[in-house]
Amino acid sequence: MSEIKKIKNLKEFSTSADRFEGANLLCPGCAHSIIVREILNATNDPMIMSAATGCLEVCTAVYPYTSWDNSWIHIGFENSSTAIAGAEAMYKARKRKGKLPDSCEGKSPKFVAFGGDGATYDIGFQWISGCFERGHDMMYVCLDNEVYANTGGQRSSSTPIGASTVTSPAGRVSYGEKMMKKDMLGIMAAHGAPYVAQVAPNKWKDMIKKIQKGFQTEGPVFINAMSACTTEWKFAPDDTIAISDLATDSLVFPLYEIENGTKLTITYRPKNKVPVRDYLGAQGRFKHLFKPQYEYLIDEWQKMVDERWEYLQRREEASV
Amino acid sequence: MKYLGWDELIPGAILFSFKEELDKDASYILPEDRPYAETNSHEAYVGDWRVLKPVYNRDICIDCQFCWIYCPDVSIISRDKKMIGVDYDHCKGCGICVEVCPTNPKSLLMFEERIPNEEALAKWPEKE
């Protein structure tokens, strides 16, 4: 096991040499790259990464440029997880047989797969499930922006109820997305994964702690990272962190972790809880909810978020 | 740079980040010391995406590094725990650094692209 990078405060953290390069083609103000930077800077070990088709992949590897300073592969929409699982299995096998090249001596590479919420919640779900069942020593990071942003904003099973997307548009007869957001973290925890956690880029300290814990964990780790999407959530690019703050402080996106499939710990409790109305009101995709005929949905949203928070707290208390 | 044709690319379309093999991992080498290959997006330019540019005022900055951590484009240059400046080749002008800046007045502000930085610094607002 390698040494954990010591990150006491932000000043110390800022001495990290970034391994993710600028001039990628992500939108200005995209949270994807904030998350990727925080994850890559959380360790000094070599990283072997993959990305499923999605914003992150198409924007960081546009010919003739790559934005990654470590090994990185893109293969398909569904199999970023299995690609990394294969690399990890190969690494283990060669290590066992003593066939690793000399340059790998004394290093402990980290295997990380990235995927958007489309690649995680829908298309790559079966593959991820397989990886977790086989117990590869890898980390899967879902960059959850609650929509298929790369292809123009279609709904995914991560899209929350009431959001207007191009395939679930809001209008005279519909309030937008009708289905609830899938509880992916619960599903991954149910695989008996040693560690699953929900993170947000604005709470960087919480995020680094969880990522480092994930790297230290033997076995598959699932990280669900909230990624505010300036284009599809429809807010100004400079508001990315403010929107993320609203999401974590209104508990729409609670930050917690589950160890060994059962032990749930809430890692962030907002000092001042913000009403969900503020979170919804800050984004264009929810703007129709403020029309009189759909306003009842805001109260339902609040009720839903409160119930979820209540449930998480009860689970933490009972630690089951 | 010369773009390779479809029949000249290495099968699997491999792009190299560095010109030569590094003797240690990139996380131990500062960007200015790295032998970037011309296929690394570090060598590319997205400065023309900007409408407004962030201008940095060293006199007010407290080196909290909020701008460094929240910059999506690796455009805030920090060395030895100090904020040095903005990388205008890679900054897309999103304005997050200005939003998260905690000082009063802010030590980063958005100005129009055509205004020279010295002129911008001269009309910096006073403390509120």
Image (spheres, helix red, strand yellow):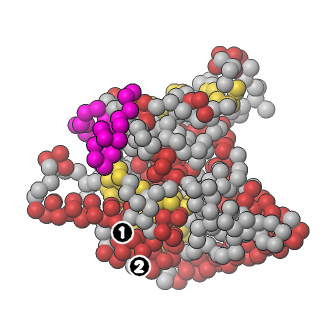
Q: Vertical placement of A305 versus B65: above or below?
A: below
Per the image, label 2 sits on a secondary structure element best described as: loop
Q: In this orientation, does residue A45 appear?
A: no
Q: Left or right? Give the position of A229 relative to A163.
A: left
Q: Quadrant of residue B123?
A: top right
Residue to which mark 1 is pinned: A220
Residue A189's spot in the image, x, y percent?
A: 45, 76
Disc 2 and disc 1: Cα gap in Å? 10 Å
Residue under the point 67% across and 43% down: A238
Subunit bearing disc 1: A
Give the mark nearest the N terminus, 2 or 1: 2
Amino acid identity at mark 1: Pro
Residue farthest to the right, as pictured? A292
Q: Amino acid at mark 2?
A: His
Query: Do the residues bearing badges 2 and 1 touch, measured as CB atoms within 8 Å?
Result: yes
Position of the N terminus of chain A, as image quadrant, is bottom left
Q: Residue B14: within the magenta?
A: yes
In the image, A204 versus A126, the foreground residue is A126
Q: Position of residue A244 (x, y in %)?
A: 63, 55
Q: Which residue is mark 2?
A: A191
Range shown magenta: B1-28
The answer to whether residue B33 is seen in the rendering is yes
Residue drawn at the location 87% of the way across and 71% of the way down: A293
